[in-house]
Amino acid sequence: MTAVARRELCLTASNECTLRLQAWGFPVTTEPNVAPTLRDESSHECRTSLSSDTSSGENFATPLPRAKRYVQRIVKPLVAVLTYDFCPSANRFLHWLKHPVGFLVIAGVVSGTFALFLNAFAWVAFGAIAVILTLGFAWPWIALKGLNARLVWDAKRGCEGERVTARLRIQNRCPWPVWGLSVQGGFRKSGPSAALARVCGMSEVEFCWDFVPNERGIYPVAIPQLETGFPFGLWRAQRSVSVEQELIVWPKTVRLNELPDMTSSQPSEEHLSDRRAGDLGDILGTRSFRQGDSLRRVHWAQSARHQRLVVTERQSGVESRACVRIDVAQDNHVGTGSDSTLNATLRFAASICQALDAEHTHVDCILGGELICLSQTGGLRRLMDALAHVPERGLPEVAAAQSRHYDGREIVCTTDRRRHEDETGNRSKCGRREVVIAAGSSDDVGPSTHLSTRRPWLFIPPGQVALSEFSQQWQRACRIA
């Protein structure tokens, strides 16, 4: 074989061609991203195949058989013509033809007409179609008539993203089995939540599956339906599933390692501070005697050493109290589902309340006009349950709950819509810390807009509502403060 023939083989080289060249005795070497190379043993010169043919302009990196390319050139325009909607305005009149029932009805009418006017043997086809239609509509209703279904959860509470086992107990009182069952609705899913294999006659079975909620709330959000379309899927019968226990899904939280200074000036004997000197707790140090100090605080050993009265300083009792206000007004939030600003606000507020409660801070949370004290027994659980019960689109505007004056020790979780209204009405309070989430687009929203006169303590731009990003921004804000 001449060198010219070898070069023509290299131009159309592929995996199959490479194997053939090796079978013919030609040494072929291949490298990643490089076409097969023929090495001439006599002259030891490497000739690398070209990636494209200059005469035709076609790419031979992954060559196709010529016949296959011709078929594709013919089939693609044909498929485009056959699938093109020439009369979109007539779809509302012909939509019923997309269902198998439409074709069966047309076939039944045609077979009945043939049986009446042409040949009586067409009655066989007409009868078969009638039996299919009867079974397709009647059997799903008969199959579900003897079923009772109950839904229970292994846990009463859960969190976003955590697995919870759902148990569906089905009792069949009829002697015939039921196939093709599925659970629809109630789980914020477009398709079936669970597909069940079979329920035998005169039996009770239990089906279990893992449910992972991606949004907080009360599950099921609607009454689940047990449905089947067996045997032909012409019509799907439904039967309600009784829910014995609801699942409360809490908002997802993140650990906040740093907190702003929330110490108040009110004395308290329950909590002690090393930053302030007082008369309680452990000894912090010593100082010179001042007029009015008690003689019980005199450190006699140090006084004898320094030849003057020296008294001890102890820890001071302080009360750490804070208020977290959560804006759940439906007019101040945008978006739906897990990425809405309302769900982001609830996640951030729940994370802040958990971090403050872990540091034994007296936290009062104001949610939709309701005051929840976390220092009480089960206060944090009641708060998380209340956050889970907030509707998907928020609450209507309600009057604020009566609370004490916190002297700037407030954290407000809201959006830039509510903040603009507060500043326009001169209702903003100086000293409070605001966690503001952008409710608009990135083009017209910023930490300081034309309606804002004061920069928020923490601003969350659009597209940065993830908990991991919030944790980093919260840490930076606490260090700056």
Image (cartoon, helix red, strand yellow):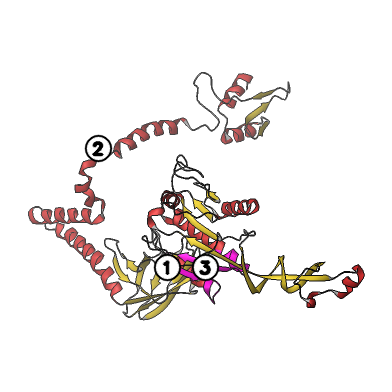
**Mark 3 in CB contact with mark 2 (< 8 angstroms):** no
Q: Nearer the viewer, residue 131 or 23?
A: 131
Amino acid type of the residue that numbered disc 1 sits on in the rendered structure: Ile
Amino acid type of the residue that numbered disc 3 sits on in the rendered structure: Asp
Report x, y in % for residue 146.
30, 77
State the CA–CA distance, disc 1 to disc 2: 46 Å
Q: Is residue 164 visible?
A: no
Count residues near mark 1 (Cα–Cα under 10 Å), then give few for <14, some for 14-19, many for 20+: many
The residue carrying mark 1 is 218
The residue carrying mark 2 is 86
Q: Nearer the viewer, mark 1 or mark 2?
A: 1
Which range is magenta?
Answer: 353-379
Q: Residue at x 62, y 31 (%)?
A: 21
Furthest toward the front, the residue is: 291
**Magenta run includes residue 175:** no
State the CA–CA distance, disc 3 to disc 1: 24 Å
Tell me the SS state at disc 1. Answer: strand
Compared across the picture, whether 41 is left or right of 350 comes to: right
The residue carrying mark 3 is 364
Pick the quarter of the image with the N terminus: top right
Q: Residue at x 11, y 56 (%)?
A: 115
State the CA–CA distance, disc 3 to disc 2: 64 Å
Sequence-wise first label, 3 or 1: 1
Q: Residue at x 35, y 81 (%)?
A: 202
Tell me the SS state at disc 3. Answer: strand
Compared across the picture, whether 82 is left or right of 61 comes to: left
Sequence-wise first label, 1 or 2: 2
**Mark 1 in CB contact with mark 2 (< 8 angstroms):** no
